[in-house]
Amino acid sequence: MTQVTMTVNGKAVSGDVEGRTLLSEFLREGQRMTGTHVGCDTSQCGACVVHVNGEAVKSCTTLVLDIDRAEVKTIEGMANADGSLGVIQQAFQDHHGLQCGFCTPGMVMSAAALLKDNPKPSEAEVREYLEGNICRCTGYHNIVKAIMAASGQDVAPMAAE
Ligand code: FES
Ligand code: FES
């Protein structure tokens, strides 16, 4: 076991990990932060997406030992300081961008990474960016709409699905 330290949602955390410990496991089991989900074992679904040093990564494919001292942000860190929903979270609610909610944490984290790099993405750009995030419920349309709305764009002309 090796001790690692990192900052998760602004709070310093540490833990003893094995060489094989995945970030998804560290967050869910070590830190009891269970918003980050695991939906596959082939790095395809994106339910486990978090930010590491500001970049979106799949935490099921990230070894904790490789990111010692990193800054990690998870869905639990996306609400505003007063506890109200962050802009992207609110947009998912407003535009019905979730059903079972299992993909949603990863979707929101991916959306945040996209909007940081591309504050006004086109619909095609949003769809392309989400190729690493699978949703079984929504058919994606309302997720795309929510992300575009979160970027401040008028989504009224986009039909609801
Ligand atoms: S659990 Fe990480 S990509 Fe599916
Ligand atoms: S809302 Fe159920 S998988 Fe996306």
Image (cartoon, rainbow, N blue to C red):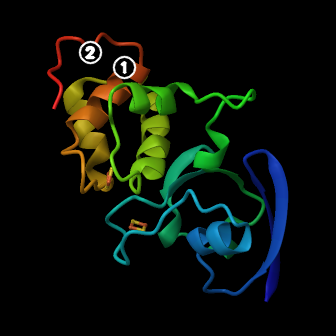
Which residue is nearer to you in this view: 68 or 24?
Answer: 24
Relative height, residue 19 to residue 51 (above, below): below
The amino acid pointed to by label 2 is Val
- Residue placed under numbered mark 2 in the picture: 155
Residue 142 is left or right of residue 81, and the answer is left
Can you tell which quarter of the image residue 63 is in? bottom right
Is the C-beta separation of discs 2 and 1 under 8 Å?
A: yes
Which residue is nearer to you in this view: 39 or 138?
Answer: 138
Q: Is residue 121 visible?
A: yes
The percent coordinates of residue 91 (x first, y second) are 42, 26
Can you tell which quarter of the image residue 147 is in? top left
Can you tell which quarter of the image residue 156 is in? top left
Q: Element type at marker 1?
A: helix
The percent coordinates of residue 161 (x first, y second) are 16, 32
The amino acid pointed to by label 1 is Ala
- Residue placed under numbered mark 1 in the picture: 149
- The residue under the point 48% across, 38% down is 113
- The residue under the point 43% across, 22% down is 150
Residue 132: numbered disc = none
Earlier along the polypeptide chain: callout 2 or callout 1? 1
Q: Element type at marker 2?
A: loop
- The residue under the point 30% across, 45% down is 130
Which residue is nearer to you in this view: 156 or 62?
Answer: 156
